[in-house]
Structure formats: C-alpha cells, structure tokens
Image: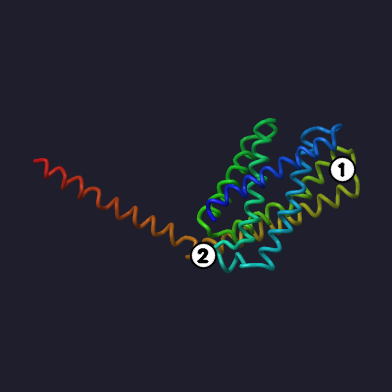
Amino acid sequence: MLFALPLRVACSLLAWLSLYAWFCHRYKHRSYEWSCRLVTLTHGILATCLSAYIGFIDGPWPLSHPGSPNTTLQVHGLCLSLGYFLFDLCWCVYFQTEGALMLAHHLVSILGITASLALGESAAEVNAVIFGSEITNPLLQARWFLKETGCYHSLTGDVVDFFFVVLFTGVRIGVGAWLMYCELASPKPRRKSMKKYHAWRSRRSEEPYLKTNGHLKNH
C-alpha cells in the first residue's frame, strides 16, 4: 500500500492541474490568480466536507483516539489535500505571489501530511487540522472574489466577514487549542518519540565509556 501512495498523490496533483487548466480556458478574460483561487475554493469545499464526514461520522474521533492507525478513507482525504498543496506551492513559487510565511505554511502542511501517510498513523489528527484550516478557506476566497468584482463593501461582504471571524475564532483557535491539548496529553502518539529519546539518551551515556575504553586499548 505504501508504494501506491505516491501514485495517488500524483493523480491528485494531476487532477488539480487539470482543473486549473480548465478554469484558465473557461475564464480567459480573467487573471491566472482568478483561476487558481477557484481551484483553492474547490479544494476548500471538498476538503471541508470530506474531513467533516471522516471526523464526525466515519471516525475515529481525533480528540479521543490520537495516534490511531490510518483508515482507507483518511488516506484518500490526505492524498487529495497533499496533491492540492503541492499544486498550490508550485503555483505560488512560479508566480511569486506569496511571501516566506505562506510558503512555510504550505511546506509544513506538506510535511505533516506526508509524515502521517508514511507512518500509517495519526491521520485522524491531521484530518482534523485540515478541517479546521479549510473551513474558513471558502469564506476567505469569497472575500477576494467580492473585492475583485467590486461587491465587497455590501451586506454580502459584511456577512462573509462575520462568519469568517466566527469560524476562525471558534474552530481554528478554540477547537485547534483543544486538539493540541489532547495530542500532548495522550501518550500514544508520543510513545515512539519517547522511545527514540530514551534510546538517544542511552547512546549518549555509553559514548564516554566507549571513548575511554578505546583510548585504554590504544595504550
């Protein structure tokens, strides 16, 4: 299954590239950023719906089962988002539209998803993070489109801003902090890290003895 993961990610990347090319063809009179943001909007909606179904219905619940083995549906969701983040990172680098902070955000997202897929665990938490970060994304894109079309300073713009602030505060900050607490409090996802730490400490404690022993043998 591990060998099939790069193929799934490649298919996801190709799908997002194809969608972007279609948007560019469909909206020739618009900028490339317009088409890219339509792709971003599409991913935001799909990722939010899929991650919500995985987290709230299919399970397992990330707040009570951190570090659990990845399910098939979780893997599909992560591959879908990983392909998108690779596409968006390449687009941002090519057109030089984003600063170092946004590029770092993309890299961290890519590394986090890749680590979960490679280890075969903790997809529940990563899926929850995707849900928390993408649930506000459609509203963020809506603000940009409203500004581009000159409709931002209206009742629609105020409604979009209101729900953006509410979701950002409640989900990203509130639920995000709760998820981080559950992750740090649970021993399961930290077990391997603790084992590696103790093994490192053990090797460090043996190094002086080995050096001294080798020094004595040389004499």
**Residue count near mark 1 (Cα–Cα under 10 Å), binned few <14, some 14–19, many ≥20:** some
Q: CA distance from mark 1 to mark 2?
A: 43 Å
Question: Which residue is drawn at the image coordinates 67% and 40% (left, top)?
Answer: 87
Horizontal arrangement in the rendering, residue 111 relative to residue 195 (left or right): right
First in sequence: mark 1 or mark 2?
A: 1
Tell me: residue 80, above or below residue 24: below
Question: Which residue is drawn at the image coordinates 78% and 33% (left, top)?
Answer: 32
What amino acid is found at the position of numbered circle 1 in the picture? Tyr
Helix, strand or loop for disc 2: helix
Helix, strand or loop for disc 1: loop
Q: How is the image coloured?
A: rainbow
The location of residue 169, given as percent across then percent down, is 71, 55
Tell me: residue 142, above or below residue 186: above
Circles 1 and 2: CB atoms closer than 8 Å: no
Horizontal arrangement in the rendering, residue 173 relative to residue 121 (left or right): right
The residue labelled by disc 2 is: 185
What amino acid is found at the position of numbered circle 2 in the picture? Ala
- Given residues 136 and 61, the one toward you in this image is 61
Q: Residue 10, located in which quarter of the rendered image?
A: top right
The location of residue 58, given as percent across then percent down, is 66, 67
**Residue count near mark 2 (Cα–Cα under 10 Å), binned few <14, some 14–19, many ≥20:** few
Q: Which mark is residue 152?
A: 1
